[in-house]
Image (cartoon, rainbow, N blue to C red):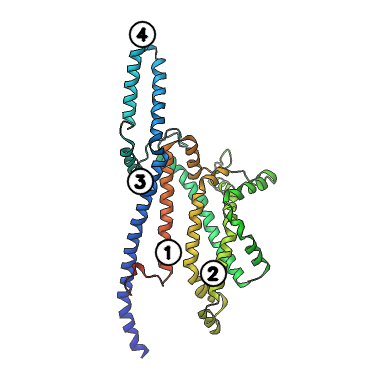
Amino acid sequence: MAEQALPVEQGVAAPAGESTLLRLAKYTVVRGVILFFTVIVGVYLTVLVANMGGYVDQIRRNEIREMVSIQVMNDPGLKSYTIEQKRQIIEERVRLEEKRLGLDRPFVVRSFFFLRNALTLQLGFAERMVSDTGSRQVRLIILERLPTTLLLFGTADLLLFFLSVFVALVLSRQYGSFWDRVFVALSPTSAAPGWFYGIFLILIFASWLRILPFGDLVDVPPPESRLLYALSVLKHMILPTMAIILSAIFISVYSWRTFFLIYSSEDYVELARAKGLSGRAIERRYILRPTLPTIITSFALMVIGLWTGAPIFETVFNWPGLGRTLFQAIGLFDIPVIVGSTVIFAYLLAITVFLLDIFYALVDPRVRIGGGGR
């Protein structure tokens, strides 16, 4: 009978698989569209906030008028002109400069142009900041800083994830042990952000022990050899990576160890033990696999929290990334760089949530994509 039933099961599996793929594609498109509209709303609100509802335009008009007035009054070629003639020249030059910058149009109209340019990364030129190569293009400023941010947070997040899963699995086997109680007791310390721990790590390892650098990306002057340059970058990444891991590992281990304990008491796990399966096989197939959706969700939310704290974190370590660039732009009131950095962060957060939805649907067979089909 088993030989006769096998072709029937194979004949039914193909259309079911096609239906699942179709639903997954449909779900992916829908989630992508929803997240894109979320990014649009967030970026437009950023445009409004960064321009203070148009108040920044008035500041810029005043700056233009002041600059033009100084130029006209100090122009040797206009010494013979009367005050009234100079005033007319000032008004004309101010009008032309405002037209060139688009300040002659209402802010509401220009805000939608700002939104379009921001979403397409046509960010124009910075008002006060420059890139390492001397360019004022906002795109170049951001592209120079983005890789260092991805390098730091990507490395730290991966280390945090695998280390937390490993420690949580170990503690789930040693419930009630000394180290289990230590991690449970220290879990509230994860309420503090990463930059808080970073300050103490800098004081201990850089200021007191003098074994690690205070911050920045590489030594000064930078090593000429590629190998030495890479080793210098790794040395400078130790403290910020430690700060990120310390800020999240205790609560992650405590949460995930609890999930492992809950799933280890399920009936199917007891049945697997009764069948004589090894402990490693039971952990991998019957405990870790069912908890992956919950773990991935928790980890993604943790990553989003780390992204949002990047401006202060990178400023503490003087890390030349996108977060520090945004912090500097806020201090200099450089609107194009503020909007551009926020757009990139919005895209990064949207991509994180999007990948979370896809991974969640792939690793959890109980999820019915789109709510339809078998």
Which residue lies under the disc numbered 3? 119
**Of the residues under marks 3 and 2, which one precedes in the sequence?**
3
Q: The residue tagged with tag 3: helix, strand or loop? A: helix
- Give me the C-alpha separation between circle 1 and circle 3: 26 Å
The kind of residue on which mark 1 rests is Phe
Q: The residue tagged with tag 2: helix, strand or loop? A: helix
Q: The residue tagged with tag 4: helix, strand or loop? A: loop
Which residue lies under the disc numbered 1? 359
- The spot of residue 178 in percent (x, y) is 68, 67
- The spot of residue 347 in percent (x, y) is 40, 50
**Of the residues under marks 3 and 4, which one precedes in the sequence?**
4
In the rendered structure, are the residues bearing label 4 and label 2 in contact, judged by CB atoms less than 8 Å apart? no
In this rendering, the label closer to the viewer, 2 or 1: 2
* Vertical side of 165 occupied by 43: above or below: above
Q: Nearer the viewer, residue 80 or 91?
A: 91
**Of the residues under marks 2 and 1, which one precedes in the sequence?**
2
Which residue lies under the disc numbered 2? 259
Q: For the point 38% across and 36% down, which residue is it?
A: 54
The kind of residue on which mark 4 rests is Ser
- Give me the C-alpha separation between circle 4 and circle 1: 74 Å
Q: Is residue 268 left or right of residue 121?
A: right
Which residue lies under the disc numbered 4? 80
Q: Quadrant of the C terminus?
A: bottom left
Q: The residue tagged with tag 1: helix, strand or loop? A: helix
